[in-house]
């Protein structure tokens, strides 16, 4: 600004230093490598922690990292809780974590003693709302794709649905047809429908299968960790399936007649990572975006916002803090250092005491 003439100002992006990146099991390659690219681009050294629940991927990652990098620049660790505990006891300049809100709290507690900055990419119950004026056939296809991608084991998957009473039956019929189109009459035989990651996760999901009225699916094979794409209707907010993030191929459906009912429900619960709304009315879409909040969102589709590297990806509140992807990742792993560079040839005396005469001069000038 002219006030500081002839000084110059600049922002220097500096690396934080030694960073710790902890990946989850559901996308164990992508969610380790994407933040690694951003951290290295920003100039940091990096320690990676792969997920113990995907051991085959962890071995591949270890081979790639050790072949590609000097371990003084990038090092990788595998193992369970004891390794996580040991890593979190070390002093870091920055911690990047992707996982559940419960584990996110543990990460924040570990960061407190050294006031280490953190980015938490968490999850939550992301709503999918279908209004009565939506393109139902398109909505059915896009919701089925987004929900059952990776057997529902996606942090931004539509977790549950709110459907307008006037179109619910038609939409559910169309969704059943889309499930068959994508995965065949027997999804267990489909090469495009994966399995649940572990027996522990399978046991948790089995307890959620008996909710509301079964519309389709419900079949499971505990030994092979298979659960069919499943839809439940007549779900109530107090049902067990609505108390935690599902993270599986189970879609509970609730009904609404007035969109204000949905907004009120969202306000009563934690802020979600994603938000999906289907309507042909742009004014209604803008209105509900203005009345709600989420980490990200899509109108008339699901999931796709995460693939746009020109937009930030991250959560808000219980679904996380901070963001990354593309340039936003570089900024996340950088300290923005503000530097003013003054001239040593010109020195304007206005800033120095005594001030009284100079203040009067400035007042006259301003008049």
Image: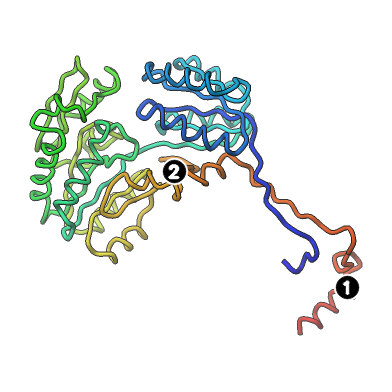
The reply to whether the C-beta atoms of the residues labelled 1 and 2 are less than 8 Å apart is no
| Secondary element type, mark 2 | strand
Residue 22 coordinates in the image, percent (x, y)? 48, 27
Viewer-closest of 296 and 74: 74
Residue 349 position, x and y percent, is 89, 67
Q: Earlier in the sequence, mark 1 or mark 2?
A: 2
Q: Residue 221 appears in which quarter of the rendering?
A: top left
Dot 1 corresponds to which residue? Answer: 356
**How packed is label 1: few (under 14 Cα within 10 Å), some, or many (20 or more)?**
few
Give the numbered dot on residue 280: none
Spatial separation of the CA atoms under disc 1 and disc 2: 51 Å
Q: Position of residue 329 (x, y in %)?
A: 52, 42
Instruction: Tell which of 94 and 179 is nearer to you.
Output: 179
- Furthest residue to the bottom? 367
The residue that label 2 is drawn on is 314
Helix, strand or loop at disc 1? helix
Q: Please give the name of the residue rendered at 19% of the width and 27% of the height, measured from the top-left corner.
A: 191
Q: Quadrant of the N terminus?
A: bottom right
Query: Would residue 162 be found to the left or right of residue 30 on screen?
Result: left
Quarter of the image where the C terminus is located: bottom right
Residue sitting at 10 percent across and 40 percent down?
A: 176
Q: Residue at x 61, y 33 (%)?
A: 44
Task: Locate residue 192 relative to residue 87 in the image: left or right.
Answer: left
**Viewer-closest of 279 and 291:** 279
- Residue 106 to residue 14: above or below: above
Residue 67 to residue 214: above or below: above
């Amino acid at each position: 600004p002219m006030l500081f003439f002839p000084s110059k100002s600049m922002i220097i992006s500096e690396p934080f230093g030694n960073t710790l990146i902890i990946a989850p099991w559901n996308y164990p390659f992508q969610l380790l490598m994407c933040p690694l690219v951003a951290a290295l681009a920003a100039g940091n050294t990096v320690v990676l922690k792969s997920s113990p629940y995907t051991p085959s991927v962890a071995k591949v990652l270890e081979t790639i990292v050790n072949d590609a990098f000097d371990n003084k620049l990038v090092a990788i660790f595998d193992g369970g809780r004891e390794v996580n505990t040991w890593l979190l006891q070390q002093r870091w300049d920055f911690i990047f974590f992707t996982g559940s809100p419960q584990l996110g709290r543990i990460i924040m507690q570990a960061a407190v003693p050294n006031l280490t900055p953190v980015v938490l990419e968490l999850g939550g119950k992301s709503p999918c709302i279908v209004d009565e004026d939506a393109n139902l056939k398109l909505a059915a296809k896009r919701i089925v794709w987004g929900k059952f991608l990776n057997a529902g084991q996606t942090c931004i998957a539509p977790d549950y649905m709110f459907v307008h009473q006037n179109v619910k039956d038609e939409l559910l019929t169309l969704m059943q047809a889309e499930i068959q189109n994508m995965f065949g009459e027997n999804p267990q035989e489909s090469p495009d429908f994966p399995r649940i990651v572990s027996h522990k996760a399978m046991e948790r999901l089995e307890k959620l299968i008996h909710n509301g009225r079964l519309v389709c699916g419900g079949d499971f094979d505990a030994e092979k960790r298979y659960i069919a794409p499943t839809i439940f209707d007549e779900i109530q907010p107090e049902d067990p399936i609505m108390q935690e993030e599902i993270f599986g191929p189970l879609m509970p459906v609730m009904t609404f007649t007035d969109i204000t009912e949905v907004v009120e429900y969202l306000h009563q619960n934690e802020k979600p990572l994603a938000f999906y709304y289907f309507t042909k009315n742009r004014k209604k879409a803008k209105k509900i975006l203005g009345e709600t909040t989420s980490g990200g969102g899509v109108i008339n589709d699901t999931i796709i916002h995460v693939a746009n590297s020109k937009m930030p990806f991250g959560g808000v509140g219980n679904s996380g803090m901070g963001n990354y992807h593309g340039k936003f990742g570089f900024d996340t792993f950088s300290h923005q250092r503000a530097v003013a560079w003054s001239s040593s040839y010109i020195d304007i005396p206005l800033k120095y005491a005594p001030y009284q005469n100079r203040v009067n001069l400035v007042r006259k000038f301003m008049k």
